[in-house]
Image (cartoon, coloured by chain):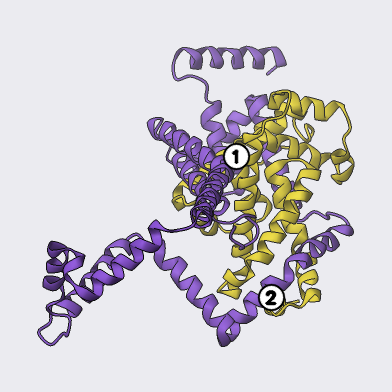
Chain colours: A yellow, B purple
């Protein structure tokens, strides 16, 4: 279904169109939210918040052809707001991030059940070890596949900076994977 | 070459590098993404590949990088479960009526609701413009000049006349003097009820002011924290950090403004 037509109908108050739009975009938005917060329940709640924001601001999407970037921008801002609020309200007992990943690896959580495979679990644990900006670049570029120009616009950074940061973020993630798991597939050949 | 010989050779190279240029792993790590993407060519490619043959940790990182390429692309969408869309629709349908009405009024652009909505939006935008005060002052000056300073204006002599009134006192002017005496008499003889009403009104204003201050305090505090972090990032010459923190400060300021102006930040109803 064409998102442009769906948005027009949503603006006219068509709940069915809105439901269809949510179903169409929920996979991406949940993936983005999980990439930022690293916790399934939290990501689900955050994804709902993102859709409520989208609903409230549908009128402000002036160029319907650019609905995708507009949606991603709202999702990103909501995720950053959420992370800031979480930072302002620290957990009752401070647990270093490294220990949190160890806890996650030893105690099965609902998140572990929810994430489809152990490989995705490993990637999300590694993502938690990255800085916010590097995690953001991995989520937007490597996972969501957004063009570098769009990411540069969203982050307010020069294109060259995003390019170099992207390479650094990828290698940092690879190192984190190796640290956590000793490498994903030690029997494979490196790039030749 | 036996395994022992290879290990000895490797150890020798490590020692030499440690005493000269330092480990080559960092440089190799910088080039691994390009190698993985197939854009590293020529001698650079050969050098990195040679390094990988002898460095287990870099080899592991290269494998992880290669593996991540496919894995990350497969994570673009996650199924949140059947109930997710229904939960979102339930939350938004509770807010749908005012939003729809607002949108209809905006789209239609006709009728009192549409006109008031557009006027409200226009005024909100104007009042937040940086040069708003200058523009208002300019327009007010022009109006005053037109009213009191043009030769054809019936109020041309009004400023001089008003000055005379002030200098002479109200009793010298029959009509104005009588009006002022009547007003002062009403004020002096005003009942306690009027005074109490004014006191209650004042108390209400003060309570409202305190409530607004309280509501907006977290946002203001967060904005200050972000600004401090931005200064620290600027001192550390981290441009991205400054950008992020300034963005955070703006978001927090906006949240504080909404909390100050609206009783419920999610709604648009003023207290």
Which one is in front, B231 or B122? B122
Q: Position of residue A188 (x, y in %)?
A: 77, 37
Can residue A38 be spotted in the picture?
yes
Task: Give the residue displayed 53% in from the left and 48% down from the top.
Answer: B203
In the picture, the quarter occupied by the N terminus of chain A is bottom right
In the picture, the quarter occupied by the C terminus of chain A is top right
* Left or right relative to B186: residue B61: right
Q: Secondary structure at mark 1?
A: helix
- Residue A164, compared with residue A17, is above or below; it is above
Q: Secondary structure at mark 2?
A: helix
Q: Rounded to the nearest whole Å, what is the CA distance between mark 2 and mark 1?
A: 37 Å
Q: Position of residue B90 (x, y in %)?
A: 82, 63
Counting other residues with Cα less than 10 Å from the Cα at mark 1, is it few (<14), some (14-19), or many (20 or more)?
some
Task: Give the residue displayed 80% in from the left and 69% down from the top.
Answer: A19
Which one is in front, B262 or B176? B176
Q: Chain of mark 2?
A: B
Task: Give the residue displayed 45% in from the left and 49% down from the top.
Answer: A160
- Which residue position is annotated with label 2? B100
Q: Position of residue A75 (x, y in %)?
A: 65, 55
- Which residue position is annotated with label 1? A132
Task: Give the residue displayed 45% in from the left and 34% down from the top.
Answer: B228
Which one is in front, A186 or B219? B219
* Location of residue B163 (image quadrant): bottom left
- Residue B60, compared with residue B159, is above or below; it is above
């Amino acid at each position: 279904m064409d998102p442009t037509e769906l948005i027009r109908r949503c603006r006219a108050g068509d709940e069915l169109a809105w439901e269809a739009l949510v179903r169409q975009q929920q996979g991406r938005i949940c993936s983005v939210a999980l990439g930022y917060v690293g916790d399934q329940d939290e990501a689900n709640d955050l994804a709902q918040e993102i859709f409520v924001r989208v609903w409230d601001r549908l009128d402000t999407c002036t160029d319907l052809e650019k609905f995708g970037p507009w949606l991603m921008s709202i999702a990103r801002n909501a995720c950053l707001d959420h992370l800031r609020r979480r930072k302002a309200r620290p957990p009752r007992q401070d647990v270093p991030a490294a220990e949190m990943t160890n806890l996650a690896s030893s105690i099965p959580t609902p998140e572990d059940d929810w994430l489809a495979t152990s490989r995705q679990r490993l990637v999300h644990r590694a993502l938690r070890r990255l800085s916010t900006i590097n995690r953001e670049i991995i989520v937007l570029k490597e996972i969501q596949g957004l063009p570098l120009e769009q990411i540069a616009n969203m982050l307010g950074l020069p294109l060259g900076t995003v390019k170099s940061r992207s390479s650094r973020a990828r290698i940092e993630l690879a190192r984190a994977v190796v640290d956590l798991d000793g490498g994903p597939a030690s029997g494979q050949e490196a790039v030749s | 070459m036996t395994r022992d010989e290879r290990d000895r050779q490797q150890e020798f190279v490590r020692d030499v590098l440690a005493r000269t240029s330092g480990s080559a792993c960092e440089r190799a790590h910088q080039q691994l993404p390009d190698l993985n993407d197939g854009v590293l060519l020529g001698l650079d490619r050969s050098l990195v590949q040679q390094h990988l043959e002898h460095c287990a940790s870099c080899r592991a990182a290269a494998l992880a990088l290669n593996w991540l390429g496919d894995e990350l692309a497969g994570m673009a969408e996650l199924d949140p479960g059947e109930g997710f869309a229904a939960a979102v629709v339930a939350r938004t349908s509770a807010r749908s009526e005012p939003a729809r009405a607002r949108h209809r009024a905006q789209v239609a652009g006709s009728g009192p609701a549409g006109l008031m909505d557009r006027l409200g939006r226009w005024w909100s935008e104007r009042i937040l413009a940086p040069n708003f005060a200058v523009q208002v002052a300019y327009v007010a000056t022009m109006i005053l000049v037109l009213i009191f300073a043009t030769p054809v204006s019936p109020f041309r002599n009004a400023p001089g006349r008003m000055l005379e009134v002030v200098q002479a006192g109200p009793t010298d002017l029959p009509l104005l003097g009588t009006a002022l005496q009547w007003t002062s008499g009403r004020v002096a003889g005003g009942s306690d009820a009027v005074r109490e009403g004014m006191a209650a009104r004042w108390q209400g204003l003060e309570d409202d002011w305190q409530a607004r201050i309280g509501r907006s305090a977290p946002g203001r505090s967060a904005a200050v924290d972000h600004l401090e972090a931005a200064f620290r990032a600027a001192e550390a010459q981290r441009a991205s950090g400054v950008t992020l923190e300034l963005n955070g400060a703006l978001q927090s300021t906006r949240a504080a403004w909404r909390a100050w102006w609206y009783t419920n930040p999610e709604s648009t109803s003023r207290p």
